[in-house]
Each structure stands twice: as structure tokens, then as C-alpha cells.
Amino acid sequence: MPHCTLFYSKTLNLEALDVIVSKLHQAMLESGLFVENAIKVRAIAAESMLTAGEKAPHLHAEIKLLQGRDEVQKSHLATLVNAVLRTSNACHSVEVIDLSPYYYNK
């Protein structure tokens, strides 16, 4: 834990994708909220994606973590991840989601 899933439009350069995934891992580590061996980052291509009705490059990072971080910590994490996504020319967004220990199992 945590899980960071990057959803990206297929128009994104795949070499750039590897760099972004690596930078996302580093940003999550730099947040100070997680130990390195707990961080999981993956990228999933969206078959079809529209932004404002247009086919345009888009990145969306979804960060799922167990409850226990306060709003300031989650906001800081989202800011760090957003800074990574902002380095691309794509539209981008970040979402931090709390998982309940009652229904998240591994």
C-alpha cells in the first residue's frame, strides 16, 4: 500500500510513460508517507478518451491508500503527484482515495 494507477490515453509516447511512472514512484516516496517497498505504481492505457469532447492526451492518477492520513497529508501527496503530471503536455488530474480496512484485503 499505496497503489498509484496512472490512466493514460494511448496517444502518449511510451518512452515518456516509463519516465512518468518512475517519477510518480519518486514523488510518492518523497511525500514521506510511505516506505519505498510498499509503493506500487502501474499504468493502464485507456482505449478511448475524450477531453472536452476532443481526442487529446490525458493523464489521470488515482492513488488508493488505507485510511489514517489527514487532509493536509493527502493534499501534499496530490500536489507532488500533480507536479509530475504537469511536466507532460497532456491534460491531467489526480485523485486520492481512502480505502476501508473493512473491505480492502490482500
Image (spheres, grey):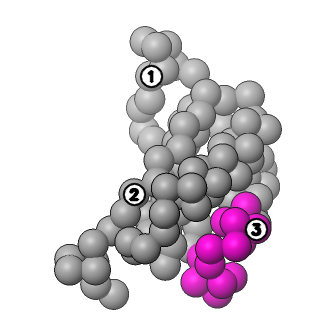
What residue is disc 1 on? 50
Q: Residues within 10 Å of mark 1 (few under 14, many from 20)?
A: few
Above or below 25: residue 59: above
Q: List the residue tagged with mark 3.
A: 30
Q: Are marks 3 and 2 in contact (CB under 8 Å)?
A: no
Q: Secondary structure at mark 1?
A: loop
Q: Nearer the viewer, residue 34 or 69?
A: 69
The residue labelled by disc 2 is 97
* Bounds of the magenta segment: 27-39
Q: What is the quadrant of residue 72 in the picture?
A: bottom right
| Residue 4 in picture, x, y percent from top left | 53, 62
Residue 31 within the magenta-colored segment of the rendering: yes
Of the two numbered discs 1 and 3 on the same chain, state the one appearing first in sequence.
Answer: 3
Q: Position of residue 101 (x, y in %)?
A: 28, 80
Which quadrant: the C terminus?
Answer: bottom left
**Residue 99, image quadrant:** bottom left
- For image coordinates 48% across by 68% down, the residue present is 69
Q: Is residue 39 left or right of residue 71?
A: right
What kind of residue is marked 1? Leu
Instruction: Tell me, yes or no, if residue 81 can be seen here.
Output: no
